[in-house]
Image (tube, rainbow, N blue to C red):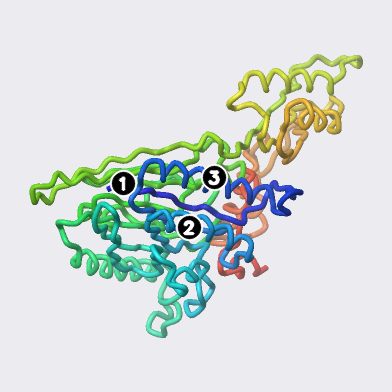
């Protein structure tokens, strides 16, 4: 049995975007559409039996009709090709209230053939060309239900987390008891797994993320654990069972600049002869056509003080050298680029207009995100007995807020947002805007 595992498509992400004159759509939406198309094409060529999507179809819970249409077109292509599609709800797919419809519920409402939607912990048996596949769902878990019940009023956050994990484990075990050992079984999860590396998505649902221990997934009952929510592809092993984050299909921002994007192909091999034991193999399939993000650092601090030096001309020369160093695969052509100019206080600013012209006309940059002048100060400022130059921007902010009397957990929340902005990540507030609203 061959399985396509994809996750975190985030249709509707339009940062660093332009308007495509032919379609009238955001060029960044076109990026994500093309990435999904390439995955589908390769999956069909590989002869997959089923597609598992582990959450976050859209940028937010209220996608516009155009974005919904483009996502549905690609799901329909898989369905019409005879490939069942399993859609797990992620945190971006869920509404503010449990009683409201979620973003991908329309597929279930319309009873779209070959499409299965999972919003709660449940077991689904999917018929495929290679036989039945059992899929247990562990979608994004929220505290909303617990917080709404009177019996949980007055509990601390840690107590609520423990109660939620206890309930989750109990419900998961109940579904595991329903599994048929002679059929292949997969666990589909949208969560932050403890020990996993967090990237740009660290501000998604800030304050709501709850790390789940690997032991709580009971992975030994499954042939494969398909993970979603974290954008960086990574994997773990629990016994003989692989636990794999497919990662997001496309880069969201500069926080994912160095991450490889793609999807996962899984094979579950049944030796037959009535044996229950199965062998699982999987391989990450990189998408080298995914839109690249590239940070270019031009250090001009080493130049001697000379009134005749043309800093702009030297910056252009070093830009050319940097592009050559990156090579054709990682060069500036077609990339979203930000430039950091490192200067001394006595040096003049570099001409941004000339740099922008070179980036667009000579190097074919897709989008110029920023050109920043970073001036190194020659004097040392002291703050609470510490040299400012010895601190990172995040440490400086922490000391500033501490002096203003900001305490945890608000301090931690502010630092997480600040860290994301410094790294070039597009922050999204949690479902509880009051986290940042109070004075």
Give the alpha-carbon distance from disc 2 to disc 3, as whole Å: 14 Å
Which residue sits at x=22%, y=54%? 184
Quarter assignment of residue 166: bottom left
Q: Viewed as shown, does residue 66 lie left or right of 209?
A: right
Residue 178, horizontal then vertical, whole percent: 19, 67
- Check if mark 2's residue and mark 1's residue have beta carbons within 8 Å: no
Q: Nearer the viewer, residue 420 or 290?
A: 290
Quarter assignment of residue 174: bottom left
Dot 1: element: strand
Q: Viewed as shown, does residue 31 lie left or right of 188?
A: right
Nearest to N terminus: mark 2 or mark 1: 1
Nearest to N terminus: mark 3 or mark 1: 1
In the rendered image, which residue does mark 3 sit on?
35
Q: Viewed as shown, does residue 349 lie left or right of 334?
A: right
In the rendered image, which residue does mark 1 sit on?
2
- Check if mark 3's residue and mark 1's residue have beta carbons within 8 Å: no
Q: Residue furthest bottom?
A: 150
- Check if mark 2's residue and mark 3's residue have beta carbons within 8 Å: no
- Residue 75 has which mark? 2
Which residue sits at x=58%, y=43%? 255
């Amino acid at each position: 049995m061959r399985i396509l595992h994809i996750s975190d498509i985030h249709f509707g992400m339009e940062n660093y975007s332009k308007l495509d004159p032919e379609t009238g759509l955001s060029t960044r939406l076109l990026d994500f559409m093309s990435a999904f198309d390439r995955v589908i094409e390769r999956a069909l060529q590989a002869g997959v039996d089923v597609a598992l999507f582990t959450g976050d179809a859209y940028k937010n819970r209220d996608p516009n009709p155009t974005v919904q249409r483009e996502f549905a077109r690609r799901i329909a292509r898989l369905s019409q090709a005879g490939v069942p599609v399993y859609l797990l709800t992620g945190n971006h797919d869920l509404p503010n209230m449990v009683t409201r419809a979620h973003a991908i519920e329309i597929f279930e409402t319309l009873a779209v053939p070959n499409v299965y939607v999972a919003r709660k912990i449940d077991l689904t048996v999917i018929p495929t060309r290679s036989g039945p596949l059992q899929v247990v769902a562990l979608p994004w878990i929220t505290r909303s239900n617990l917080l709404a019940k009177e019996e949980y009023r007055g509990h601390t956050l840690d107590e609520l987390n423990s109660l939620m994990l206890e309930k989750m484990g109990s419900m998961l075990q109940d579904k595991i008891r329903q599994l048929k050992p002679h059929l292949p079984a997969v666990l589909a999860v949208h969560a932050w797994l403890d020990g996993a590396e967090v990237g740009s998505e660290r501000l998604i649902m800030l304050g709501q993320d709850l790390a789940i221990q690997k032991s709580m997934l009971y992975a030994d009952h499954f042939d494969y654990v398909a993970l979603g929510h974290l954008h960086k592809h990574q994997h773990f092993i629990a016994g003989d069972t692989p636990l794999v984050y497919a990662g997001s299909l496309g880069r969201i921002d500069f926080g994912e600049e160095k991450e490889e994007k793609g999807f996962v192909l899984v094979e579950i091999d049944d030796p037959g002869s009535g044996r229950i034991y199965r062998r699982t193999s999987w391989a990450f399939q990189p998408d080298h056509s995914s839109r690249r993000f590239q940070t270019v650092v031009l250090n001009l601090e080493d130049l001697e003080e000379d009134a005749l030096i043309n800093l702009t001309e030297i910056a252009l020369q070093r830009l050319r050298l940097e592009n050559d160093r990156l090579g054709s695969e990682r060069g500036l052509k077609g990339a979203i680029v930000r430039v950091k100019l490192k200067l001394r206080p006595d040096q003049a600013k570099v001409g941004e207009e000339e740099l922008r012209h070179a980036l667009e006309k000579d190097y074919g940059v897709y989008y110029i995100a920023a050109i920043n002048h970073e001036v190194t100060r020659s004097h040392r400022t002291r703050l609470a007995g510490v040299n400012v130059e010895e601190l990172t921007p995040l440490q400086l902010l922490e000391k500033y807020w501490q002096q203003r009397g900001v305490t945890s957990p608000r301090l931690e929340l502010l630092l997480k947002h600040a860290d994301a902005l410094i790294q070039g990540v597009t922050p999204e507030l949690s479902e509880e805007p009051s986290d940042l609203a109070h004075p």
